[in-house]
Amino acid sequence: MRLIVLDTETTGLSAENGDRIIEIGCVELLNRKITGNHFHHYLNPERDSHEDALKVHGISNEFLRDKPKFDAIAAAFLDFISGAQLIIHNAAFDVGFLNKELERANLGPLSGHISGITDTLSMAKEMYPGKRNSLDALCDRLGVDNASRTLHGALLDAELLADVYICLTRGQNALLIQEDAADPTQQVLTDIDLSQFELPVVFASEQEAQAHLVAMDHLSKASADQTVWNNHA
């Protein structure tokens, strides 16, 4: 399945009270690898950012004055994410803002354009209950290099989140096998049910068993008979 890792920056914290998106960054994942295909735009929000928001993203109101408005890039944005599974950290926040922008553009809710959403914050809370699970905290915990992140930025944060998501989903219960394909972008991941295999039990030969006893005897003598197996009640 095609995955799109998405992040936004906004003028403030409340889409319901008129705050707007000022930056969208999207990164494509295929076969658990970043493809280099991305979508990124700064946007004119038609209002100033709150002072606290400016401290987070550092994107000045003046810089955004000549940037396109959301409705000017909406079609390209929807085309990029069409049919994909979105990966978002604290998804409710970004989805709330995106739905408001789409509503203003008369384009329908986000759910009508994608296959679903995975919230990495919810994933992290389940995996690390009681711990800090911000993007920076997860980068530190999972060994993702975020040294270049001094301020929030949608594209950079989406790239970091892509690495974090790969780390969070690294443990899998099934083998993933890439089928041969002439077009590498069309490769398919196949789930293999391991329960269908009966694994053979291989017993030690008489010679191997005797060699094992000799080795155990050497260890016992070397430790003055203080080995665990000699002192096991």
Image: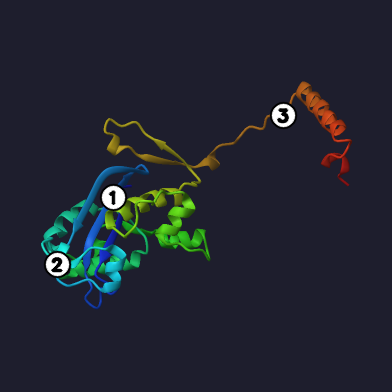
| Neighbour tally class for label 2: few under 14, some 14-19, many 20 plus, Cα within 10 Å | some
- Residue 24 pos. (x, y %): 24, 58
- Residue 78 pos. (x, y %): 19, 56
- Residue type highlighted by circle 2: Ala
Q: Nearer the viewer, residue 150 or 163?
A: 150
Q: For the residues marked 3 and 2, what is the alpha-carbon distance in whole angstroms?
A: 69 Å
Q: For the residues marked 2 and 1, what is the alpha-carbon distance in whole angstroms?
A: 23 Å
Q: Earlier in the sequence, mark 2 or mark 1?
A: 1
User: What secondary structure is marked by label 3?
Assistant: loop
Residue that badge 3 annotates: 203
Residue that badge 2 annotates: 105
- Residue 162 pos. (x, y %): 36, 50
Image quarter of residue 36: top left
- Residue type highlighted by circle 3: Phe
| Neighbour tally class for label 1: few under 14, some 14-19, many 20 plus, Cα within 10 Å | many
Q: How was the colour assigned to the protein in this rendering?
A: rainbow
Q: Nearer the viewer, residue 182 or 51?
A: 51
Residue that badge 1 annotates: 27
Q: Earlier in the sequence, mark 3 or mark 2?
A: 2
Q: Earlier in the sequence, mark 3 or mark 1?
A: 1
Q: Residue at x 34, y 39 (%)?
A: 188
Camera sees residue 113? no
